[in-house]
Image (spheres, helix red, strand yellow):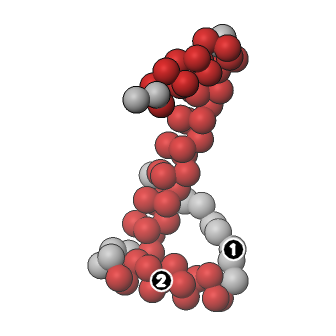
Amino acid sequence: MATITYRTTSEKRDKLAQMAKEQDISVNKMLDELVTIALTERDAFMRFSARASRGDTDQALEILRSKSEP
């Protein structure tokens, strides 16, 4: 397990503590969940970007158009 020191404003700290309290978890657990979400979103974006760079834009747009038609 690693330790990270995070500096923030008192206002943000208080809001984070309130969020954690509302979910009945520790501030540490709340931060861990928020970091997990951010990393997951970044990984998805990176995978999508890699696939998009290999794709055919015209074909993709045609597929989207055909899916939106009744």
Give, as a three-letter code, the residue at label 2.
Answer: Ala
| Residue corresponding to mark 2 | 17
Q: Position of residue 4 (x, y in %)?
A: 59, 61
Displayed quadrant of residue 6: bottom right
Compare marks 1 and 2 and give the one earlier in the sequence.
1
Is residue 3 visible from the viewing direction of this image?
A: yes
Which is nearer the eye, 40 or 27?
40
| As drawn, 37 above or below 20 | above
| As drawn, 12 above or below 35 | below
Q: Position of residue 64 (x, y in %)?
A: 53, 25
Circle 1: element type: loop
Mark 1–mark 2 Cα distance, whole angstroms, equals 14 Å
| As drawn, 7 above or below 46 | below
| Residue corresponding to mark 1 | 7
Residue contact at pointers 1 and 2, CB within 8 angstroms: no
Which is nearer the eye, 58 or 44?
58
Q: Position of residue 23 (x, y in %)?
A: 33, 76
